[in-house]
Amino acid sequence: MITLLSRKRTSSLALAIALATGGAVVATAVFPAEASAQRRDRDKEKDENDGGGYSTEFREIYLPLEELLKSENPDLTGVEARLEGLSGVLNTSDEKLAGGQMIYNTGTTLQDKALQLSGMEFMISSGQLPAENQGRYNFIAYQLADQLGQLPKARTYLQVAIEKNFTTEGITASGLRVTMMESFFSAGEYDAGFEYLRQAVATQKGQGLAVDESWYRRGLTVAYENEISPAVYQLAGMWLNDYPSATNWRDAANIARNLSDFQPAEILDLFRLSRRAGALIDEADYDYYVDVADARRLPNEVKAVIGEGKASGVIRESNLFISESLEIADRRIAADRSDLPALERDAMATSAGLRTVVAAGDAFLSYDQYGKAARFYERALNTPGVETNTVLTRLAISQVGMGDYTAARATFGRVTGTRSPIAMLWSAYTDQLIAQTPTTATAVPAPAPATAGTTE
């Protein structure tokens, strides 16, 4: 079962507090009793010097409105038109703050979101909001713009709220970033949403902070549900790099299986990854692995996988398919192992055909003899008619087994076509191994699963 986040729109984050973070704002324009020409001249001079003060035009509209709105049971007929006139004379910083407050508060009374947003925008643009309130006011502007469907504007205000470190008891910094992603996703702007996620992750890590797993899970869910490739695998790689649990690896493998029409040989290489990542955690996983490996073709690998499943307690003794496969593997292993020297000799011959060379690579890979497998796969790549992506995948798997993670990473990067998702997930696993390898030490192969065969 894929345990990702269900698809839902959360861009209205914490609407329970909606404008509880900003109900009516309290402040008004303060005019000295002096209203002489001398005072008007000083206001004009202040306006010219620092953008503040109140013009005569502003006073003539603002003061009557203030008296009306302060009165008991005011008649609000036509007030919106008068507020529109007020908006036209908000030029100085003082006028924008006082006029914006009046417009916003009236919009709150009238439950008019467009009016509220207009007022909030004037207040924000005044440059006079206290530093401690700037995040809050920008968040309110975000909410209003979002509810009005003005998404680009909403994102602008939300970004400022994030940068101003706005949080409340019900709103976290991580939640705000998820909200920004949702703004893109809800509009179908998936590439922009994924890019925002990548940048948010980079910013978080650049600050030495952990990335909330919900970021990855939400982005991955959207990519999965909309079948967006290669983004779904790129995001899976980022997620697994930070949260490499067995369950997460299994989910990632299931995503690849569900979104792709893989053939048995491709499924086999995906299960090989699951095995290494410790993600075979269900009996059905072992059944499927054993089926695609086929005890008649790869008896040693089948026997080893069954042994691991039984040792872990996942495979039941009553599983008839597993029991029959193990019997076939046991009967064939001795002969299969004895054939390896001859197969190696034939594949090394100058006249060796492509099928023989690839068969040798596959055989030695199944016996965990990675160096020999890699040599045959490299030779096969130069042979006409080769299935390049298959051979590249298995060459890279062999390089992982050898502990040559850098080479493996480069080889996986060359895989294209239907095998690309498999290669991208293997690359994520290789990155995990690289991160675990001391930089001052020689790369050591990852512990190979228990096997009945020999290792090189």
Image (cartoon, helix red, strand yellow):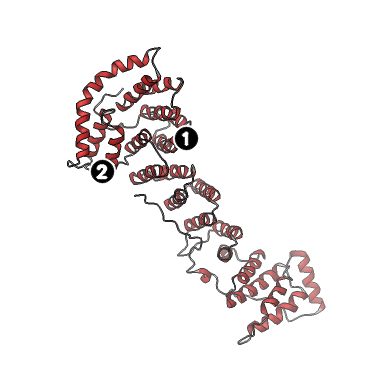
Q: Is residue 339 left or right of residue 175?
A: left
The C terminus is located in which quarter?
A: top left
Residue sitting farthest toward the top:
350
Image position of 134 with respect to 214: above or below: below
Q: Which residue is mark 1?
A: 417
Direction left: furthest residue: 318
- The three-letter amino acid code for the residue at tag 2 is Glu
At horizontal 34% and vertical 46% (from top left) the residue drawn is 247
Residue at x 44% of width, y 42% of height: 237
Q: Quick check: 200 above or below 422?
A: below
The numbered mark at residue 34 is none
Image vertical order of residue 296 relative to residue 176, above or below: above
Please give the count of numbered marks on the rendered protein.
Answer: 2
**Residue 210 visible at all:** no
Q: Nearer the viewer, residue 195 or 163?
A: 195
Instruction: Report the front residue among 123 and 87.
Output: 87
- Find numbered disc 2 in the image and state the secondary structure of the residue it sits on: helix
The disc labelled 1 sits on which kind of residue?
Answer: Gly
Residue to which mark 2 is pinned = 283
> Image quadrant of residue 152?
bottom right
Q: Position of residue 358 (x, y in %)?
A: 38, 23
Q: Spatial distance from mark 2 to mark 1, Cα to Cα? A: 30 Å
- Is 342 placed above or below 241 here? above
Q: Position of residue 84 (x, y in %)?
A: 70, 73
| Disc 1 crowd, CA 10 A, few/some/many (<14, 14-19, 20+) | few
